[in-house]
Image (cartoon, rainbow, N blue to C red):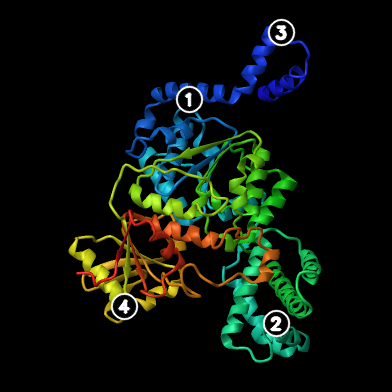
Amino acid sequence: MLKEQYKTLYKTTKYKRKLSKIEKTFLHDYKNINSFIEIHNNNYLKILRSQTPILDKVNGYPLDEYQSRVVLSNEPATLVIAGAGSGKSLTIIGKIIYLVKNCNINPEDILCISFTNDATINLKNNIQKNYNFDINIYTFHKLSLEILKQNNIEYQISPEEHLSTIIDNFIDNIVPKSSIYQKHLTRILGKAYSKKELINLKRLIQTFINLYKSNNYNISYYLIILKKIKYTFNIKEYIKNKSLILFIFNIHIMYQDSLDKEKSLDFNDMINKSISVLKENKIIKKYKYIIVDEYQDTSLTKFNLLNEIINITGAYFLAVGDDFQSIYRFTGCNLHIFLNFTKYFKYSKIFHIINTYRNPQELINVAGNFVMKNKYQQHKNLVSQKHLPKPIIIYYQDNKIQSLKDLLIYLDKQNIKEIMVLGRNNKDITKYIDNTYKQNNDIYTYQNISFRYLTIHKSKGLESNTVIIINMENSLLGMPTKIKDEKILKYVNNTKDIYPYEEERRLFYVALTRTKNKTYIISPTKNESLFITEIKKDKKNVLQIKNRLK
């Protein structure tokens, strides 16, 4: 408020014809107020840090200067932009401990939100084990259920596969009995369609409905979409897409009716319902501090839920994330919410954590330069004390099965035991293994050498001693994937690529930065990924091997 008063005073003073000495000094100082504030804050934080011994040992590790600034800050809304391996979780724990021990905030008055069950469990166990107290740690969906419970509203959770079952039933059982639906299906896929085309259609419908609901569109929005496509496509495409929208609309209605009959909610409904309940009843636990991890993955509805809670409780808000690792656009995540933080929160501050403790500096340079080709990524200069010459190795080998075996044997000879293999899709690994491998869930064993296989999406938040990236081909299902989003999805997806393969670039960045040491990339000799063509130009930090490994 004081800042706003100074602003008003500045506006009235600067247009005066005659200024006193005090007024001239005020105008000069006001023009430089941000630098004065920064100097003052830095000095104050230095004093505060010296008086806060907990910063010297959080989970056994000292917090660095940038992490400490976050912990000691006291802004109504704070965004922390932190790179891969920079200690985001450590900073969050440090903040929680500081609030409890130094600010005398009751642990029950702190709400912490993460995006996965594993992340919430790990954080909860960490705090319990090391500090012996509990805080409220939820995923967005569990938080929504808790809000409904506090408002005496009981619902069952619908299984994730329920929508898929409804779609299958509609297309396989209902469509054959209806001439109208058959007509729509023919317009969408043609008279002679393959099984694969039908499967792809089912996936498209599921994605469309999930995105529709994740943005909390009213059911009447389908009418608006119909009007929009009329002026977007030619007549032939318009007829096809009109049929597609009507097709999806009927499935959507059927799906929602089935949820209502069972008195159940899907994941999107949980959030949307909790928002409407909060707006009506305003009943929620009076949190004083809200912390959200992986904020770059926030959707519009999740943001609306957060905003409603903050408005009701008046809680301070801390968001932590990395726009370089925003890779869930297909689920409705909206990166603009992250990148425009100060527009959404009036009294806010942005902090950067620039030190990273996982990757060698040489790898950070390659990965960072690569992802910052995207026009709207936050510019970062991450710093690591770890150095390793040529930490990215491109291994050219056309025999996929043999290439992975060669790499595993090579790493085993170097006594490297912790290995993570990453692919774009779940089935990528099937192209690189044969019956000589043993499998136990996501763990594969060849002779005495074991590795864990994950998709890049599932690997986010994890790390390994050594990483191998597969399926780096310039092909439809390679990396980057050449599969384009159906045009119809743009009506329910709020974000799109400005620069070619923006989301795929971020995905590749995530893959490169899972390693503590080196990342090996298996590539064909003649049809390499566009991303490999780009990064191999950095000959200082990227090694190319075209002969068999020994």
Task: Looking at this view, name the residue that lies furthest to the top.
Answer: 21
Residue type, mark 3 in image: Ser
Residue type, mark 4 in image: Ile
Residue type, mark 2 in image: Ile
- Crowding at dot 2, Cα within 10 Å, few <14 / some 14-19 / many 20+, comes out as many
Of circles 2 and 3, the one toward us is: 3
Per the image, the residue denoted by label 1 is 42
- Crowding at dot 1, Cα within 10 Å, few <14 / some 14-19 / many 20+, comes out as few
Q: CA distance from mark 4 to mark 2?
A: 39 Å
Per the image, the residue denoted by label 2 is 188
Q: Is residue 371 above or below residue 340?
A: below
> Which numbered disc covers residue 20?
3
Please report whichever mark, 4 or 2, sits nearer to the chain's N-terminal start.
Answer: 2
Nearest to the observer: residue 469 or residue 204? 469
> Which numbered disc covers residue 410?
none
Q: Position of residue 488 (x, y in %)?
A: 69, 70
Check disc 2 and report its element: helix, strand or loop. Answer: helix
Q: CA distance from mark 2 to mark 3?
A: 76 Å
Q: CA distance from mark 3 to mark 4?
A: 82 Å
Q: Are marks 1 and 4 in contact (CB under 8 Å)?
A: no
Q: Is residue 283 left or right of residue 451?
A: right
Nearest to the observer: residue 246 or residue 386? 386
User: Which quadrant of the rendered structure holds the C terminus?
Assistant: bottom left
> Which numbered disc covers residue 401?
4
Q: Is residue 201 above or below residue 316?
A: below
Q: CA distance from mark 3 to mark 1?
A: 32 Å
Please report whichever mark, 1 or 2, sits nearer to the chain's N-terminal start.
Answer: 1
